[in-house]
Amino acid sequence: MANAEHSGRAAEGFGVTGVTAAGPVRPRLRVARLGLWLVAAVLAVRQVAAVLSTPRGDRLTDLETWVGPNGVLHVKGSLYDSTQFTGTPFGGLVMKPLTRAAEQALGWGWTFGTLLLVAALGLVAARALPQPVSRRTSLLAAPVAVSLLMLSLPVRNTLWLGQTSIIPVLLVLLGCFAVRGRWAGGVLIGLAAALQPAVLLFAPLLWFTRRRRAAAVAGATFAVSTALAWAAMPHDSYTYWVHHMAGVGLGGEADALANQSLHGALLRLGLSGPLEIALFLLLGAAVAVLGLRRAVRYARDGQLLLAVAITGCAAIAVSPTTWQHQLLWVLLAVVGRVGKRASDRYVWPVAVVLVMTLPVKMLLPNMASLYTLRDNVVLLAALAAATVVPFLSRTSPYYQTPIPTEYAAPVPARLRHVPLLPFLRRVLTRPNLLLELLLIRVTYAAYQKVRLAATGGTNSGGRARAEEHGHQILDLERWLHIDIEHWANHAVVKVGWLRDFFDFYYESFHFVVPLSVFAVLYWRRPVDYRWARSALGFATLLALVGFWLYPLAPPRLLPGLGVIDTVHGVQDFSKPDYGTLTALTNQYAAMPSLHFGWSLWCGLVIAIIAPRWWMKALGLLHPLFTVSAIVATGNHWVLDAVGGAVVVGGGFGLTYLFQGPRARTATAAPPVVDAPARVKQSAGLRDGVG
């Protein structure tokens, strides 16, 4: 493949890379690198422990198709007479003797072998980064790549199922970047295509990037391997290639959510028959052509790893079946650079990492209108990378030097060591909206999961402990003479309009007001938006610690107290019912009250920032109405509100400690001139150049 440098000359070979800056490694950089490798090792150990600690019948289920009692190794007839085998006939021909040798060490041997393949994949990908790269990037890329691979859903599924899907990806990368000979590279890519037919799309990439001999060798290797398997196993080959059309329907229905290909998406949309096949062929051809054109362009630009990732993403879409453990190509697309501003550079890599590491339910809300998008989110990411994402060319002036971020001038603090993290400077410009919405959604989903996990994953899991804590809070409030929950609840129940008002306020304003405050700050006061967001984030994190350590039954769920649940109705304490949230939220996460905490955060932010006195007053009314609503509806104790106030105070305090005082006036800080630039500038002044 041609590697066009900035000079316009084409370098020989697919694996040509630039030379990084030489020099000694700084101690701090060495420590960071060691720490990242330690993180990668911890993740690997965790994955091994998760797989091997699972009962034998529940782990490595796909590998059981080889060595199980009805697996490939013990079935004398067709490969596809076994339980769930979905590979190509060539894969069966090659892997059968290898897995027979590993049968006695099924779990350990296969799992550790897979980890070694993942480590090799990360090392090859790190060395193939588009040049030029900084010294820091070249040193830290490998552990970061291995860590991301360990966290990714395809690798986790591969380890869990005992699949071989990492091997084709590694063979392609080795053929592209590790071997020097064109014949060897073509053979490796051809073998990868024999194991995963959609990988044959790399042959046109080789052809159009002037590696035609390697392309021909890849095609010939694929044909010879497939023909060899056909000669050895004609019935199985006919079953795979003809009867099942390249494996469609083997191992699961083609419309299953795990099949993240265009074919699977069209079937899930309700299309079928000749119309679906024609549309799939048409869309697949369009994606293949667009993806290959983009891949060739970026390969000639010198971004070889990005070209490989784009081709792999196109292969995901055009394959009749692309199961979840075969989606590593999307993660490789993280190397592409998108955006002219430095603040926009993180949007694409963060989106890719989140899509490839988190369940889709954490990325998108559980809403019927979003089911289609949620069911195909990985496919959409692959399609975006292959066809539409505007990756920057290396010849672009923004590739190496994006538009810098403007920072506010630092505000002097009264305490000597504040801020503790001076690199967290105040940014003057608005953050990227898409990135903010994505991170807010993921953070809230994580908050929900941690909150529910505090009681063992179910609302009934921590009931006894939560009720015991409820009696402790009640006794403390009686001692303090602030146990007004029963009186306030029954007083409000007797007044219909007041009860309706507090129920509506409790259900609606908890999210509407904070989101409105965020929206106004984002648009009008971006510096204050970041300050307020950090404070709320720290407060919510502290609240999660409280939910975990002190599960607490609210007054409405404490038996014998007689408090009426005005929002959800009278409860059966053995099986409480609060609508669709019954199984999704921890109803024993009452201390501290984030209903009051978030409202207090809103009131304080408005009181500090609002320019008019009446605006400040309206802002402070919100926490007053909220504390009245949470007590009157029986959802919180008075001390829960005190706990909410404590975590909000802690949130603002941590923001102050880490980032320093809030910048009351957003003035730009003077530009920072690095040492080499200062030396050049002073030399120029001495020489009379100014």
Image: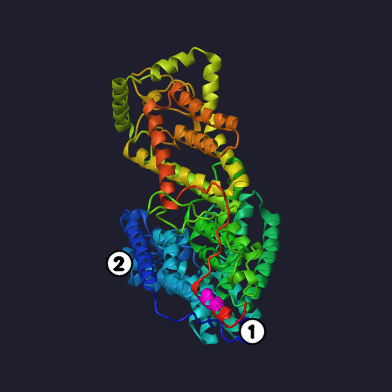
In the rendered structure, which amino acid carries the disc numbered 1?
A: Ser
The residue closer to the viewer here, 54 or 230, is: 54
Residue at 55 percent of width and 40 percent of height: 609
Query: Of marks 2 and 1, which one's residue comes earlier in the chain?
Result: 1
Secondary structure of residue under mark 1:
loop
Does 309 appear in magenta? no
Q: Is residue 575 above or below residue 374?
A: above
Name, please, the residue furthest toward the top. 494
Look at the picture and state if 206 lies above or below 568: below
Left-right relation of 667 to 48: right
Q: Position of residue 30 (x, y in %)?
A: 37, 71
Question: Can you tell which quarter of the image residue 682 is in?
Answer: bottom right
Q: Is residue 677 magenta?
A: yes
Which quadrant holds the C terminus? bottom right
Residue 630 - label? none
Residue 679 at what x, y percent from top left?
51, 77
Q: Which mark is residue 105?
A: 2
Q: Is residue 187 left or right of residue 588?
A: right
**Residue drawn at (38%, 59%), measured in percent from left and top?**
60
The crowding category of the residue bearing disc 2, from other C-alpha atoms within 10 Å (few below 14, some 14 to 19, many at least 20), is few
> In which quarter of the view is residue 547 placed?
top left
Of tags 2 and 1, the one toward the viewer is 1
Q: Which residues are magenta?
A: 676-682
Residue 666: percent from left, percent from top: 57, 51
Q: Residue at x 47, y 71 (%)?
A: 137
The amino acid at mark 2 is Ala
| Residue underneath mark 1 | 7
